[in-house]
Amino acid sequence: MTDLIVTLDGPAGTGKSTVSKAVADRLGLPRLDTGAFYRAAGLAALRAGVDLDDDRAVADVVAGKVFDQEEGRMYLDGEDVSAEIRGQPATAASSLVSAHPDVRGLLVVFQREWVARHENRAVVEGRDIGSVVFPHATLKIYLDARPEVRAQRRAAQTGLDRAEVLDELSDRDRRDSTRNASPLIVPDGAIVIDTSDMTVVEVVDVIVDLARRVAA
Ligand code: DC
């Protein structure tokens, strides 16, 4: 079978996760959530008690672990850590460790190996997928939305205050797009979809249609 790699990048609150799941289902492909790898790396570093600001120390921990994901569940050395990586400690830790070049280098290799094990046919979601992990992907999508809309969606999901969420999102955007290691950018050749005024179904339809066309 020929390779079919669909990448989905973009900031938080654009619907990446929901959209990538639905696109993968419709195309009959597995989906890889790379954010879960960074979260699991943060959790592993926390458990090991190393300094989260120390790239080399965190990378040494990450290098000794097995990262896997199946059916949307995340496994660290075979342990299902899906719930724990969504908690506040692992979320905060993932944000710190994802800024480190050595940690990123390792996780990028693990992500490529995962896709290779899945016959190079997958929907892969993250921040640097079309730019760094799979620059030669079959189809690259960049999801975007106005900050107020993204904050509104996050607030509805989490029950938190919208103004607070907007502040936090703006901070995170600034950190993600200005960091030295793999900043969040629109990858070369990516199709940008502004989801602000679209339903999930509409976004999914557009992507599935594009994927079928490029794969034909
Ligand atoms: O998408 P998420 O919130 O699960 O991502 C968790 C953290 O990992 C977040 O700080 C962004 C970062 N991340 C990254 O730097 N590169 C990726 N490909 C995916 C996530």
Image: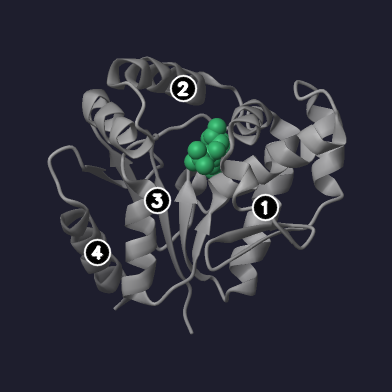
Inspect this view and state whether residue 79 appears: yes
Number of the front mark, 2 or 1: 1
Q: Are marks 2 and 4 in contact (CB under 8 Å)?
A: no
Q: Residues within 10 Å of mark 4 (few under 14, many from 20)?
A: some
The first of marks 4 and 1 along the sequence is 1
The answer for how far apart the CA atoms under marks 3 and 4 are is 18 Å
The residue shown at (65%, 48%) is 108
Could you tell me which quadrant the C terminus lies in? bottom left
* 91 lies above or below 129: above
Q: In this view of the protein, which residue sits in the foreground, 163 or 133?
A: 163
Q: Residue 66's x, y, as percent?
A: 78, 57
Residue type at numbered disc 2: Arg
First reached walking from the N terminus: tag 3 or tag 4: 3
The quarter of the picture showing ligand 1: top right
The answer to whether the residue bearing label 2 lies less than 8 angstroms from the nearest atom of ligand 1 is yes
- Spatial CA distance of label 2 from label 1 is 24 Å
**The residue under label 1 is which amino acid type?**
Val
Task: Of the two numbered discs 2 and 4 on the same chain, state the one appearing first in sequence.
Answer: 2
Residue occupied by mark 2: 172
Please tell me which residue is depicted at 67% across the width and 63% down the height of the picture: 113
Q: Residue at x 36, y 22 (%)?
A: 165
Front position among marks 4 and 1: 1
Few, some or many residues within 10 Å of mark 2 (<14, 14–19, 20+): some
In three-dimensional space, the C-alpha distance between marks 3 and 2, rounded to whole angstroms, equals 17 Å
Point out residue 168 in the picture as x, y percentages from the top left corner.
42, 19
Seen in the image, is 176 located left or right of residue 63?
left
Q: Is residue 146 above or below residue 140?
A: above
**Quarter of image, res 88:** top right
Lower position in the chain sequence, tag 3 or tag 2: 3
Distance between the alpha carbons at the discs numbered 4 and 1: 34 Å
Q: Which residue is the site of mark 4? A: 210
Q: Which residue is mark 1?
A: 81
